[in-house]
Image (spheres, coloured by chain):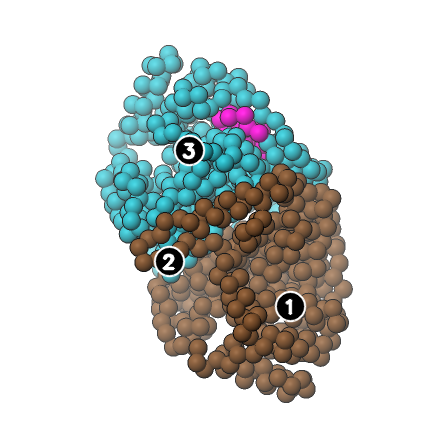
Chain colours: A cyan, B brown
Amino acid sequence: MKDEHVFPVESLRQFSFGIFKKIGCSDNDANLATEVLLAADLRGIDSHGLARLSGYVRLWEANRINATPHIKIVHESPSTAVVDGDGGLGLVVAPKAMEIAIAKAKTAGTGWVAVKNSNHFGIAGYHTMMALQHDMIGWAMTNASPLVAPTFSVERLLGTNPISLAVPADKQPPFILDMATTTAANGKLEILQRKNKEAPLGWIQTKDGAPSANPHELKDGGALIPLGSDYEHGSHKGYGLGAMVDILSAVLSGANYGPWVPPFVAFLQPPADPVGEGIGHFLGAMRVDAFRPAEEFKKHMDNWITRFRAAKTIEGKEKVLIHGDPEREMSTQRKKEGIPLNPKVVEDLKDLGKKLGIAF
Amino acid sequence: MKDEHVFPVESLRQFSFGIFKKIGCSDNDANLATEVLLAADLRGIDSHGLARLSGYVRLWEANRINATPHIKIVHESPSTAVVDGDGGLGLVVAPKAMEIAIAKAKTAGTGWVAVKNSNHFGIAGYHTMMALQHDMIGWAMTNASPLVAPTFSVERLLGTNPISLAVPADKQPPFILDMATTTAANGKLEILQRKNKEAPLGWIQTKDGAPSANPHELKDGGALIPLGSDYEHGSHKGYGLGAMVDILSAVLSGANYGPWVPPFVAFLQPPADPVGEGIGHFLGAMRVDAFRPAEEFKKHMDNWITRFRAAKTIEGKEKVLIHGDPEREMSTQRKKEGIPLNPKVVEDLKDLGKKLGIAF
């Protein structure tokens, strides 16, 4: 877009690192949080990148994020653990929990870590991709602020609750699924808001549950709709997947679930009657060779990917998508050309820099 | 429906047991296969119940189902196994694989079993519900005959690839998700075909990828559409979930995947160039107390279920669904009143009974 400014990756990295240091993060944590945010910007998931930085700082100012968490295992078995994130940045807690899942998988074949007392963890795909270098399949889920109405409900009881799965291949790039369990993620609404455009019907409902095309509807008590758009087209399935993510991330870990999940924005207060601690994640790692030799598996993944990529398309459509391809292509391009940021985000980051004394 | 006949559960049980015995199953296996089929009929998933019995027999006649399989673990780690189903009925192979997952979970915290060389396994929910009595969360997935076109594809490369998750609660009934990763399952098309009704747009496409309302479209080379209905409404997410099921069930186990999955019907030949053995499943069991005390977890599940059940509804809608509720209510009713079968199914079962000398 013409009105976007493009920034070299390295300058954004330094800025983000500086901000996280200023709020008290260790070098390691500031670095880790920065890499998770940058991964989103590089992959084109702009809503989860540096655009969120000032929001994290506001939560820290409100004493709702702990910059020096003592992250620890509070319960475990050979293939499982529950991790207490101690109110830390999800950007820091989740990768550390994923390391535990990977370590468990090394000895037990698989590792599954439910996390409580955490915060927004950035893009789910960052965490699942950590498994790839170990020839493991990575899993990640998280619950989130309630913005989604279950089928037939006018109440917002679920977050956009994403599911990610990363699967290694051999010569082909990995298969990386990273999806909200809603028809459209919140980030897509934000884009429409900025462009002053309407949303397709099936994404949003009004506060009374009627179909709406207004991307600002959530401000008036409206809700996002689960994947499927309406009951006739399977929205109860999207709702079921969102529920699955909520249960595994939070009921299993001891975090808040459903409407009790604390909001991601500092100007909204968390519910006064929490049912758990913070928000919850569910992370997993499965060693491929706990099932079959990794080389054999990866060759078959190459065959799977090649066959699907070569599928005959509907006239006018260029190709059949392999999950992870568009984000990887974007990442390659942005590493070279830099990361475009929306003017409002640039303004916001400049203000943040001024406030904390870090030049943007 | 007026034209349906209602049969006592016990008489259907005896008939099904007799048929499976006739094709050479052991008492145990005939009993197990019967219970899996009956569970579908009881729960109202008629497409996966006794309606399928003659189809299994035809596959056995074509030497594509082994009635006396030697089911064995061919690879394992503390929390994983790959099971070779030896071409047996999925109805028998899957519950045995689930027992292995449960046994692994007892010692390792979780158990994950990928199955190859199997066949259609009935309803996924039967297998996940096996975990409940052990205070475990059950997982089940299976790939299936290719009837589904990925987003933008005219080729059918995936099955309806279901995902099921069963989660125990305390005083509330369990949460049981059991969903195809398509907008509508094939069984819903069969109902429309029998009633001579049109399908909603978004369920099916023609052989060229155009929207279609014709429930017979698959016979002309059309395809089912992944959950989401079209790209704008997230069908690439439904496609991603179907791909996840295919990869975990078959690439991980060594079964056939994508377009190589053998058809469920005897009149269609399996592909001449298989990439694995039979069809594949992925089954899992997670011990709740490998994460937190089971009583604590189940009380929170009660709270989760109670809150969602009490959600304020859209005007005119009676209630917000909890997954598993409709099927359990149907099951209670049918246990008392009997199971209604479509006249075509009754005719088919009578013919089957005559052929094998078992009175229906």
**10 Å crowding of disc 3: few (<14), some (14-19), many (20+):** few
Looking at the rendered structure, the secondary structure element under dot 2 is: loop
Q: Secondary structure at mark 1?
A: helix
Horizontal relation, residue B220 to residue B166: left or right: left
Q: Please name the residue that numbered disc 2 is placed on.
A: B318
* Mark toward the viewer: 1 or 2: 2
Give residue A307's position: percent from left, percent from top: 52, 55
Q: Residue at position x 54%, y 22% from top?
A: A69
Location of mark 1 (residue): B35
- In the rendered image, which quarter contains the C terminus of chain B? bottom right
* Tags 1 and 3 on a common chain: no
Disc 1 marks which amino acid?
Glu
Query: Which disc is residue A271 wearing?
Result: 3
Tell me residue B102's x, y (percent): 69, 51
Residue positioned 43% across, 43% down in the render: A158
Q: Amino acid at mark 3?
A: Pro
Residue at the image point whose x is 61% and y is 56% from the top: B129
What is the chain letter for disc 1? B
Give the number of callouts: 3
Magenta run includes residue B339: no
The chain letter for the residue carrying disc 2 is B
Distance in Å between CA atoms under marks 1 and 3: 46 Å
User: Which chain hosts label 3?
Assistant: A
